[in-house]
Amino acid sequence: MAVVAAIPLLLLGAGAAGFAYVYGTIHLPPVPALRQTTYLMDRSGKPITELHAAVNRTIIPFERMPLRLRQAVVAVEDKRFYSHDGVDPIAIARAAWVDMQDGSFDQGGSTITQQYVKTVFTGSEPTLGRKIREAVMAIKLEHELTKDQILAKYLNTIYFGHGAYGVQAAARTYFGRDAADLTLLQSATLAGAIAGPSRYDPMVHRAAAKVRRNYVLRQMAQVGAIGEARATALSREPVKTVAPQVLRSPAAYFADYTRRFLESRYGSRRVFGGGLRVRTTMDLSWQRAAQRAVRTYLGGRNDPAAAVVAIDPRDGAIRAMVGGRNFRVAKFNLATQAHRQAGSAFKVFTLATALEDGVSPWSIWHGPPSIVIPDRRCYTNGAPWHVANYADEAAGTMTLAQATVHSVNTIFAQVVTQVGPENVAQMAHRMGIQSRMEPYCSITLGTEEVTPLEMTEAYATLAAQGVRHEPTPVAVVRGPDGNVIDRPVDSAGQSVLWPNHANMITSILEDVITSGTGAAAAIGRPAAGKTGTAQDYTNAWFCGYVPQLAACVWVGFPRGNISMRNVGGFSAVYGGSIPALIWHRFMSAATTGMPVQTFQPPSLVEFPTPTPSPTPTPTPAPTPTPSESPSSSLSPSPSPSPDQTATPTPTPSASPTPSTTPEPG
C-alpha cells in the first residue's frame, strides 16, 4: 500500500522528461452521465413517488450544498484541497510513512480530486498503472475545473450507504431533509461516512458513527471551521437519523401505472436512472377524496374492493385512480387490469349505435317481463335467446330514452337486433373500450368484460360531446436540466360520435340521476350517469360525469365473480347502491369550488315524432329453467341487468338463472 501510495512521488523523481511523456499519453475522458432518480409529482408539483434502481441519486448545484457540509468533508477528506494541484505530496508521504511504521498499510493519501477520478474514470483496481492514471487525470482535471466545481461533482457522486449516492440522496435517506437544510451535526455525520459507508452507517452502527462524527468535528476545529469549545459540546450529542424510509406513495396504483407508461415511451433505463422530473395529471386532493369515499362505504375487512378512475374529458388527463386497498399487499390494479362485466352501464353503446342508425330516442317500444328473440344471430346453444327484466317486471310501452333511464332489458334486446351487435361492439371501441369483445347479442346487456379505465374513457367521450381523448397519466416530462422532453396529454382528441348524439345521450343520462336508477349519485349540479349490475350481483358499477370531469366506480371482489350480499347495510350490492354512493361522495368533493356548468342541450330537429315500435312484437318467453342457460363456451351469458330501483334494497330470487335473471343496477 505504501509503495502504491508513493507512486506519484517516484514518478516525479524520474525527471521532467519522464513525467512529461506519461502526462502526454494519459487523457481525461468525457465525464459519463450519472444515473439519477426520477421524481413523479401531481399536477401542482406535490410529490407522489421516486423511481430508481440500485442507484438513488439527485444531482444538486454547488449553491445548494451548505458551507458547513463542504467544510466538514474537506476537513476530514482533504485538508489541503484548496491549495494542491490534484495530488497532495505531503499527504502521500505521510500515508506512506505511517504505513511503514505500523505495518497496517491502510493509510490513504488520495485527494478529493483523486477520489472523484477513481470513482468516475479509473475504478479502484490496486495496480501501478491505475494509480498513475489516477494521479495524472487528477492533475489534468484541476486545470479544467475550479475547486468548487470539482467539490460539487465529488459530493454528487460518492456513495453514502443504503443506495444513496451524492449528498442530496444521503440527506433524504438518513435525515429526511434536503442537503441544503442539513445541520452541522448531520453534515459531520455524512462526512464521516464517506470513508466507510457500512462501517460508519448511522442507522446501523450508531456508536461507530458517533466516534467518526466526533473525529470530523475535531478536524473542523483544527482547520478553524468551528471553535474547539463548540466541537467539544457537539460531540456529546447522540447520533439521530430518521427511520428507514419505506416510500409509501399516496397514489401507489397510479404511480405504478405511470411508471409503466413512462417505460413504454422512454425505456426502463431512462425512467429509473435518467433523473426525469415528471408532472403527472393526478390531483392528489381528488385522489385522497376518492380513497376516502371508498373507505367510507367499503371499510370492512371482508367487504368487496372498489376501483375508481376520474378523467378530465377535455384532454384525457387522469385525475384520480384507486386500484385496490393496499399496493404492498396486492399489486394487481383493479382500475386498469381487472376485466369485468359492466352490466347495464354498457347500454350507452347500444343507445349511441341506435341514434347513429337513425333510431329516434322517442321511438316507442314495448317492454314485456320477458321475451324470446328469434334472430338467429342471438341463438344460444342452438335455441332462441331468452331475456327477462329484473324480477320479471313488465315495463309496458315507453320510449327508447325511458327504457335507458329505467334500464329495460327486454327493450334493449330488441334494439340490439335492429342495429346489430357487431355495430355495438364497434361503437364501444370507438368510444374507448380497448378490450376484445365478441359481437354476441348479449353485448347490449354488458356481458363483455371491460376495465374501469376503459369505461371512464368512454363516458368521458360523452362528456366531451363525442370527442375521444386518449387517457394519460403524464402532463409534462422534463430532463434533469429542467428542459421539457415531452407533453403526452392528448389535447386535440378525435371526434368519434356526432356531437348532437352525444348531447342527446347525456340528456337521457341526466334523467338516470334525477329520476332513474342513479338517484343516489345526485350531487346538486348537472350530472349524467348510468348504473350497471352483473349477474347475481358479482360486479356493480356507476359511471357518470359533469362537463369538466368523468368518473367510474366499480365494486366487486378482486379474486373473481363472487356475489356481493349483505354489504354496508344492503342485502345486495347493485349499481345504484354503493357504487353510486361512492361516486356521489367523490364527485361532491372533486367539484367543490368548480364552476357549475350545464350540458349542451341536444337539437331535437333531427329526431322524428314518436311512431309505433319499429320492431316486430316480441314473443313472451316462459319462465326458463336452469337447463336453458346458454353454454359459456358458445356464448356469454346474456344476464347483466336493468337497474329498476335507485334506493330500495332488492330481495333477489334464491337461485337466478344466468340467462334470464337480471339484477337491479
Image (tube, helix red, strand yellow):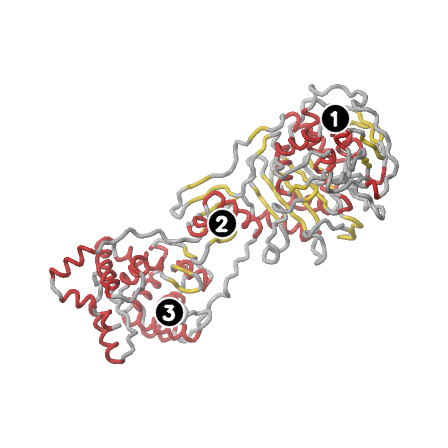
Of the two numbered discs 3 and 1 on the same chain, state the one appearing first in sequence.
3
Are there few (<14), some (14-19), or many (20+) residues within 10 Å of tag 1? some
Q: How many angstroms separate mark 3 from mark 2 (CA)?
A: 32 Å
Mark nearer the N terminus (2 vs 1): 2
For label 1, the residue is 418
Q: Residues within 10 Å of mark 3 (few under 14, many from 20)?
A: some
Tell whether 337 sits left or right of 114: right
Q: Earlier in the sequence, mark 3 or mark 2?
A: 2
Relative placement, left or right, of 135 versus 660 is: left
Tags 3 and 1 in contact by the CB under 8 Å rule?
no
Give the residue type that dot 1 points to. Answer: Gln
Q: Which residue is label 2 attached to?
A: 40
The nearer-to-camera label among 2 and 1 is 1
Q: Which residue is mark 3?
A: 196
Looking at the picture, which amino acid does disc 3 mark?
A: Gly
| Mark number, residue 599 | none
Q: CA distance from mark 3 to mark 1?
A: 77 Å
Secondary element under disc 1, as helix, strand or loop, is helix
